[in-house]
Amino acid sequence: MNILTFGPNGSGKGTQGAIIKEKYGIDHIESGAIFREHIKGGTELGKKAKAYIDRGDLVPDEITIPMVLETLAKSKEKGWLLDGFPRSLAQAEALDKALKEAGMKLDFVVEIMLDRQIAKDRIMGRRLCANDNNHPNHIAFDAIKPVEKDGKLVCRVCGGDLSARADDQDEGAINKRHDIYYDDKTGTMAAVNYFKKQADTKMISVDGSKSIKDVSALIMQQLP
Ligand code: AMP
């Protein structure tokens, strides 16, 4: 099964992605997380991408598109849930073309809808686990609140160290990411609408303002 997920930064897309991945045993591919791995590992790609990411700008397509498509190809047998890509109409078209060429079908598109101001308020409280990108932690949500150990907050799943992403604490970078997401001319909403028009892809659009459990139930009701 191959799934594409959309939702503004802060909509809980990563959290829901982790739940879906777990249930269906498919690979969770997050373009932003791949970039962060490259930056951590000091690779050439990471060096090129870092300045864009810190500002909240998109990393250029000539770097991003091949990187994501290569990763997807590796998960062809297992199936995948793609998160963070496509973020523009151009990327949507490139993905559609590449999938057709590779004989891969897009089965579901999950869209988590959320008001821009709520999304912004949520971003600043999320925390990243050093051990596993799929361990959601957020200081404002009881269901995924980090736990306290030796006077500091650690991952609620594994006790790993937590950090906040620099681009999550910078209001300018958050606004830029949201400008890109809510742009329905050439940005991410244009990519969402591109897939909405495709007859053979089932679209699942859910209200992201509800609790993690409720959003998950809404999505799961519509997945097989
Ligand atoms: P995310 O973790 O999805 O918020 O992504 C973090 C940052 O990685 C974004 O703000 C962009 O700078 C970069 N990035 C992630 N996915 C893409 C993409 N599909 N196209 C271009 N840049 C991306």
Image (spheres, rainbow, N blue to C red):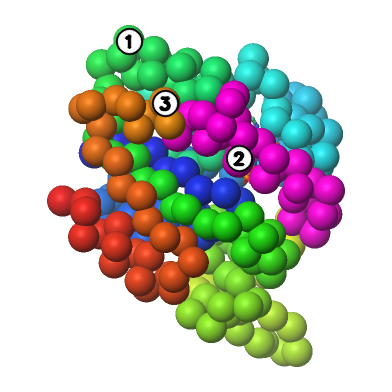
Estimate the x, y position of residue 197 in percent, counting from the top left: 33, 27
Secondary structure type for disc 3: helix
Q: Disc 3 to disc 1, how far (Cα)? A: 18 Å
Q: Earlier in the sequence, mark 3 or mark 1?
A: 1
Q: Report the Cα–Cα distance between label 2 and label 1.
A: 27 Å
- The residue located at (60%, 84%) in the rendering is 147
Q: Nearer the viewer, residue 216 or 120?
A: 120
- Amino acid tagged 3: Tyr
The spot of residue 2 in percent (x, y) is: 29, 36
Secondary element under disc 1, as helix, strand or loop, is helix
The residue tagged 3 is 194
**Amino acid type, label 1:** Glu
Q: Earlier in the sequence, mark 3 or mark 2?
A: 2
Q: Is residue 193 left or right of residue 37?
A: left
Please, what is the three-letter code of the amino acid marked with disc 2?
Tyr
Secondary structure mostly seen in magenta is helix
Q: Which residue is mark 1?
A: 101
Disc 3 residue crowd, few under 14, some 14–19, many 20+, Cα 10 Å: some
Q: Is residue 197 visible?
A: yes
Quadrant of picture, ligand 1 = top right
Q: Is residue 66 left or right of residue 117?
A: left
Residue 179 located within the stretch drawn in magenta = yes
Q: Is mark 1 within 8 Å of ligand 1?
A: no
In the rendered image of this protein, does residue 139 appear above or below residue 68? below
In the image, which disc is placed on residue 181?
Answer: 2
